[in-house]
């Protein structure tokens, strides 16, 4: 996808097994990722790797949804429509930036 090199952007959901809202957040993010052709990845903050990635992105609460390395929402649910809108805005911004950087 343009703006990301050859890498397809990832829509990541940071979760914990004890999180009551995480199941809904995962379902919403998965549907948006499928619709927009993004890679979907669930990250369990209860693992060493998940915690390290969360700390790197300054994710301190769950559920959190991140597009590549940009946090879209942290510690709360977001509607599918609002998530799609926010993802589309960021993709458009990144595409425009990539277009400007081309020689």
Image (cartoon, rainbow, N blue to C red):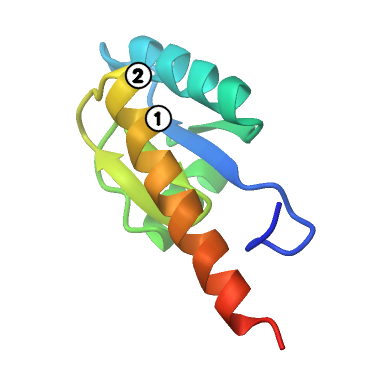
Residue at the disc numbered 1:
84
Q: How many marks?
A: 2
Residue at image point 27% right, 14% down: 21
| Mark 2 residue element | helix
Disc 1 packing (10 Å; few <14; some 14–19; many ≥20):
some
The x, y position of residue 78, in whole percent, is 25, 25
Q: Is residue 76 left or right of residue 7?
A: left
Residue 15 position, x and y percent, is 40, 28
Instruction: Name the quadrant of the C terminus.
Output: bottom right
> 62 left or right of 51?
left
Q: Which residue is mark 2?
A: 80
Q: Residue at x 44, y 41 (%)?
A: 88
50 up-or-down from 70: above or below: above
Closest to the observer, 27 or 82? 82
Left or right of 37? Residue 86 is: left
The numbered mark at residue 62 is: none
Residue 5 or residue 52, whichever sits in front: 5
Element marked by disc 1: helix
> x, y (%) of residue 62?
29, 32
Horizontal and vertical percent for residue 74? 25, 40
Q: Residue at x 38, y 57 (%)?
A: 55
Disc 2 to disc 1, C-alpha distance: 6 Å
Q: Are marks 2 and 1 in contact (CB under 8 Å)?
A: yes
User: Which residue reaches farthest right?
Assistant: 6
């Amino acid at each position: 996808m343009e703006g990301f090199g050859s890498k397809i952007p990832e829509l990541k959901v940071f979760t914990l097994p004890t999180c009551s809202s995480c199941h809904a957040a995962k379902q919403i993010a998965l549907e948006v990722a499928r619709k927009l052709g993004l890679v979907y990845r669930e990250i369990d903050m209860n693992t060493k790797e998940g915690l390290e990635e969360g700390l790197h992105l300054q994710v301190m609460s769950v559920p959190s949804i991140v597009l590549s390395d940009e946090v879209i929402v942290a510690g709360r649910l977001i509607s599918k429509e609002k998530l799609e809108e926010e993802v589309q805005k960021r993709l458009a911004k990144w595409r425009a930036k990539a277009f400007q950087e081309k020689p």
